[in-house]
Amino acid sequence: MEQQVCHVTEDEKDILQEIMNIAFGKAAADLAEVINIFVVLNVPRIQVLKGAELSGYLREEISDFSDLSIIEQNFRGKFRGSAFLVFPSGAGKELVAMLDADHEETFESGTIDLLEKESLMEVGNILIGACVGKMSELLGDVVTYSPPKVVVENHPNEIIPNNLFNPEYTAIVMKTLFQFDDRNISGFLFLVTTHDSVAWLQQSLARFLEQYE
Amino acid sequence: MAKKFLLVDDSPISRKMLKSCIPVEGVAEFLEAGDGLKGLNVFKEASPDITFLDLTMPVMDGVQALEEMKKHDPDAVIIVATADIQAKSIEKVMALGAFHVLKKPPTKDSVREILQKVDEYRRR
């Protein structure tokens, strides 16, 4: 019978934190090349949870944001899971202004229009793709991505896809907080791995570290 | 070849990775610190030959630590070892007097190359 709860050691969490740090640094640099912005980075955090705890954890982590714009993208390979890029609602307008100042006046208040969604997806694609891609590269895998999806929510209850995360099984959550300097926008990137990639992840982390023994 | 290295990084694994990439001839001393403030204190007490400094750290970040270290010893060789490879970050730390920026993850080749540059700089 498949083991439901995996034990992840503190050393493994530490390596994963460093790998996410490297990967998000690459993602920030990629985004800074596309739009003239400086991304303030923070130390990533790693949590090991059961699938049933994911919604509550995410709700707690982003409780400071009243309304949310979430860009969700699934990734599949041996490294498998979901990425959630979370911004406070309204960040989409700022992102539009950063990506294309000409469209700044086309908004109607209180609505999230196509341009905002496209901007959120564009930024999501860059940050999620570069971060997950770099992590996969460092861990020796190649992943494919589902198309990004933008959801506007006032709570994160419904964002965890039930078909990916069994309530009884282990999920590893990697979180990083970032700010766009000068724009007063903060956001979170959460990467949540599925249970079936945890064993592979542990082996890959050990292999990654072997080169430094 | 330098003998005394200070590694400042909040991640023990990251310090271990970097240490394993530093080629050592003869006896070398490795000093470590887990945040910028501790790193600054060790730097002032021990006057390391070469300091490797992370940027994203708790308590005192690497930019602040770099400024303080250069104030204390303007000739200090401080290599910023970071995952933050945004052009603005690199420009900023170079303007503050960093000797070089080492992109994470370190490799034996990338570290050796920078240490050779340090040796060349000191021979001038």
Image (cartoon, grey):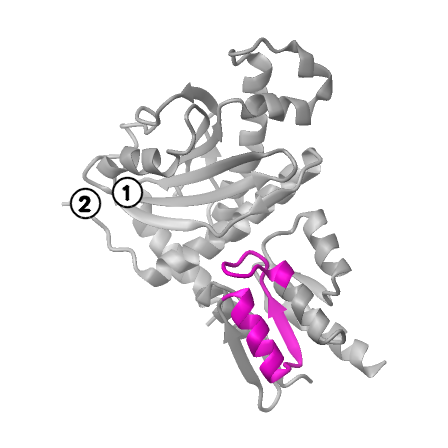
Q: CA distance from mark 1 to mark 2?
A: 8 Å
Q: Which one is in front, A150 or A38?
A: A38
Q: Earlier in the sequence, mark 1 or mark 2?
A: 2
Along the horizontal axis of the image, is B43 left or right of A156? Answer: right
Q: Which one is in front, B67 or A131?
A: B67
Q: Are marks 1 and 2 on the same chain?
A: yes
Identify the residue shown where x is 63% and y is 37%. A31
* Amino acid, disc 2: Gln
- The residue that label 2 is drawn on is A4
Image coordinates of residue A158 in percent, x first then y, are 31, 24
Along the horizontal axis of the image, is A43 left or right of B6? Answer: left
Q: Residue furthest bottom?
A: B26
From this viewpoint, is residue A195 visible? yes
Mark 1–mark 2 CB contact (< 8 Å)? yes
Q: Is residue B120 above or below residue A71?
A: below
Image coordinates of residue A65 in percent, x first then y, are 43, 30
Does the magenta segment cover residue B61?
yes
From this viewpoint, is residue B23 visible? no
Mark 1 residue crowding within 10 angstroms, few (<14) / some (14–19) / many (20+): many
Identify the residue shown where x is 46% and y is 50%. A44
- The residue that label 1 is drawn on is A195
Q: Secondary structure at mark 2?
A: loop
